[in-house]
Amino acid sequence: MTATNALTQRLDAGPVICAEGFLFELEKRGYLSAGEFVPEVALEFPDALRSLHVDFQRAGSDIVEAFTYNGHREKMRVIGKEDLLEPLNRAALQIARSVADAKPGNFMAGNISNSNIWDPADESKQAEVRDMFAEMVAWAVEEGADLIIGETFYFAGEAIAAAEVAKASGLPVVLTLAPMGFQEMADGVGIVETAQRLEQLGVDVVGLNCFRGPATMLPWLKEIRATVSCHVGALPIPYRTTETEPTFFNLSDPRAEVASPHGRTFPTALDPLQTNRYEIGAFAKEALDLGVNYIGVCCGATPMHIREVAEAVGLTTDASRFSENMANHFMYGSNERLADNVVALGDTA
């Protein structure tokens, strides 16, 4: 069975879970800097990265995605460490491969993403971006990736370039868009139109990831699912975006007593704006009911969110052993050994 058949046949059979969002989680754990968000952890703290992959895997992620987001040549130039580009990419891919291999049936994915230098009017910049994608995809192939994930593209042209480079590898391709708040791609192309173009290029899974929470991602997912015939992917952020604040870039927190020093909630003051786990579970179930079988969570994701997604679509994970059991809670429970006078405090505590 080819890798392409393995991925699409798994998706044909039911949901496939993919964890993303390593930047936020590793920053919270103290392994990279907010703002820079460069995945040097693959070189400096490989055990921390491996541990996070394992935690997401136990929670139900079927895909171990190499942590090379922002690990492209331009970002490494920004921080003055271009010489670490290939070692970083290969280390991240090797870590992901070893974790995926430890669980039969898991996929390992190479990753390319938004370059943040794409310019629709500058062909030289476009060529530079293509070259960055090509070298990262080549390293992923050499390190044994089962598929290529291209993600968080807000320019349609860049998404198309990423798809073309990824498809040239011969591996299955997942390509997800991340529209900003202006309800179209940043180069003025329609979101649904871009998804259709990606399907025409032979992308195996098209969809949306990042930037938008469940409330502002679902309407676009419905349109995409109704328009394309290939598999669709959905990986929201776990934050309460709204019609007036459709992405986490423009979320406000008027109740905050101390604002972030840079004046925005994104990316370091979003904590009070998170969805709860049940909202993420409800999103996953609704996405599945739409016919979306490639489901996950992006920036802000924790293993708890991934477990919630997996269980919401009917899967049991290794981490399901520790799913909530309020029957034994000292105040909320129903276990006959619980003290009646303490349980009674649950109504007044």
Image: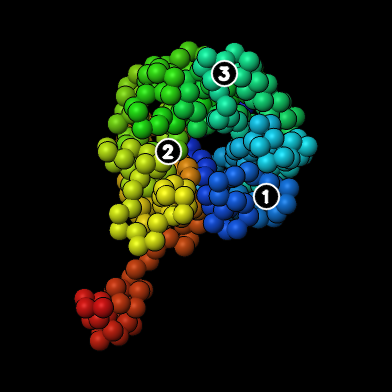
Task: Point out which mark residue 161 bears.
Answer: 3
Kindly identify the residue that appears in the image at 28 percent across and 84 percent down. 342
Q: Are marks 2 and 3 in contact (CB under 8 Å)?
A: no
Q: Residue at x 44, y 55 (%)?
A: 260
Could you say which disc has been placed on residue 41 in the image? Answer: 1
User: Which corner quadrant holds the N terminus?
Assistant: top right
x and y percentages locating residue 238 in the rendered image:
40, 47
Report the Cα–Cα distance between label 3 and label 1. 28 Å
Mark 2 highlights which residue? 211
Q: Is residue 182 above or below residue 91?
A: above
Q: In this view, does 50 lie to the left or right of 317?
A: right
Distance in Å between CA atoms under marks 2 and 1: 23 Å
Amino acid beneath label 2: Phe
Mark yes or no: residue 344 visible.
Answer: yes
Crowd around label 3: few <14 · some 14–19 · many ≥20 (10 Å): some
Nearer to the camera, 348 or 321: 348
Q: What element carries label 2?
A: loop
Q: Distance between the residues labelled 2 and 3?
A: 21 Å
Decide which of tag 3 and tag 1 comes sooner along the chain.
1
Q: Which amino acid does label 3 sit on?
A: Ala
